[in-house]
Amino acid sequence: MMTITAEIARKCLEIRYAGLPDEVVDRVKYLLLDHLGVAIRGAQSESSAAVNRFLSRTAWGEAGVPVIGTSLTAEASHAALANGAAAHAPELDDVVNTASLHPGVCVMPAALSAGHLAGATGKELIAAITAGYEVMVKLGIALDPAAHYARGFHPTGTCGVFGAAVAAAKLLALGESQMIHALGISGSQAAGLLEFLADGSFTKRFHAGWAAHSGLIAALLAREGFTGPATVIEGKFGFLKAYSPAADMAKISTGWGAPYEVMRTSIKPHACCRYKQGPIDCILKLVRENDLRAETIERVTVSVLKAGFALVAEPRELKAEPKTIVDAQFSMPFGGAVAILKGKAFLDEYSLENIHSPKVKELMRRFDCVHDPDIETEFPRKWPAKVEIATREGQRFITRLDFPKGDPENPLTWDEVIDKFNRLTAEVFPEETRRRIVARIRDLEHLPAVSELLQLTATPEKA
């Protein structure tokens, strides 16, 4: 009898560019451009500066893989580590609602490094990314995200290593047996604890980079004959049983490729946790439509989904007094307050200056985060949000939405994704370089070598 792990390997090997619908190819390109923009900007962050200092002590020279948004090159798995950590830093990376995880920051860095090593083409990269997303997301759904979170795990890190391994294995042209071993090796590297929430430390960003790094390592080891358990997904001590008390193995195969999970992936317009995106949309809508000002607001009541309550609403004292940018990214009161005061909640709003602002601090104290059964009924198929704003004059304004901006049902257009890319990268690259990157992505199926795309993302000093 074929194991679930072997079935996954076989299904992934069957994914080829020639068999992908046009809309899937287009969506991969759309997601890749978004990923590169976030990674380029994230490479300028404080956490990435530390990673890059680490890389500089293990310099690989001109033959290494370019580290996106920098002048550095590194050994392939170290480049994947740096690129994944950078892309997760701004909290603007893509996300899949039903699995509550971020696939791009794990799958794409591993795929880009593996593609560079293998001399892969754009078509091969598209197929590998499609397969990596499929595996990572299906595992996240099968785990039951709420149960997985309750055990203290971050599904981006834990599931990400499998998606990264599959993408890398395809680009390295591994056979079925080798891909099974790559998945088996990945299972012993599935990691990511939520304890970063306690003090706003950088390890959440590390989870994505480490998953990309570890998935590539798993594929490279499998290529050389290293073995891993063929029942790593479903076994008695396998991934699903060890990491969740509510796992459902049947969900791994349910709806495989119908549609592909890249088609269910959302893009973030706000620089914060996914569970804050819908509420911020609601807040901005109420403020703009009713010309509300901070000084006239008495109370803001935000209905937060139960699965994300511990991430963005509890403990109340910490969420009302963020100390670091990571704290702020996971504080619903902070995100709502800057949205009201600044009219947006993009990267510049998530700053230490705003964290220490007396106006922001005072407004955060007027926020209440509540449980609301009304928004739970269709979760996780929908991620509804509801916000009520009460004014000091006794007015009450309420709005609700089912699909936050950026969801496939309420998507950013290509032009909006390009605008996001340009806003993120304008401080790093001149306009001409940004145009070239966008053009390369739009024509990705004709890219002769992944290395050409990576070289475009190196800083001007490198180029």
Image (cartoon, rainbow, N blue to C red):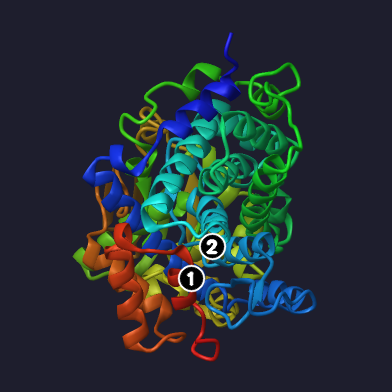
Can residue 41 be seen at all in this image of the molecule? Answer: yes
Left or right position of 34 against 141: left
Quadrant of the drawing holding the N terminus = top right
Question: For the point 67% across and 40% down, which residue is it?
Answer: 153
Amino acid type, residue under disc 1 in the picture: Leu
**In this view, the mark in front (1 or 2):** 2
Q: Quickly name the residue at label 2.
A: 116
SS assignment at label 1: helix
Which residue ends up furthest to the top in the rendered image? Answer: 1
Pick the residue in front: 10 or 291. Answer: 10
Q: Is residue 297 above or below residue 215?
A: below
Residue 365 is at least partly visible in this image: no
Estimate the x, y position of residue 368 in percent, counting from the top left.
49, 52
* Residue drawn at x 70%, y 71% as measured from the top left: 51
Classify residue 4 by image quadrant: top right
Task: Find disc 1 in the rendering and name its residue.
Answer: 454
Q: Identity of the amino acid at label 2?
A: His
Labels 1 & 2 near each other (Cβ < 8 A): yes
Query: Observer-nearest residue: 337 or 269?
Result: 269
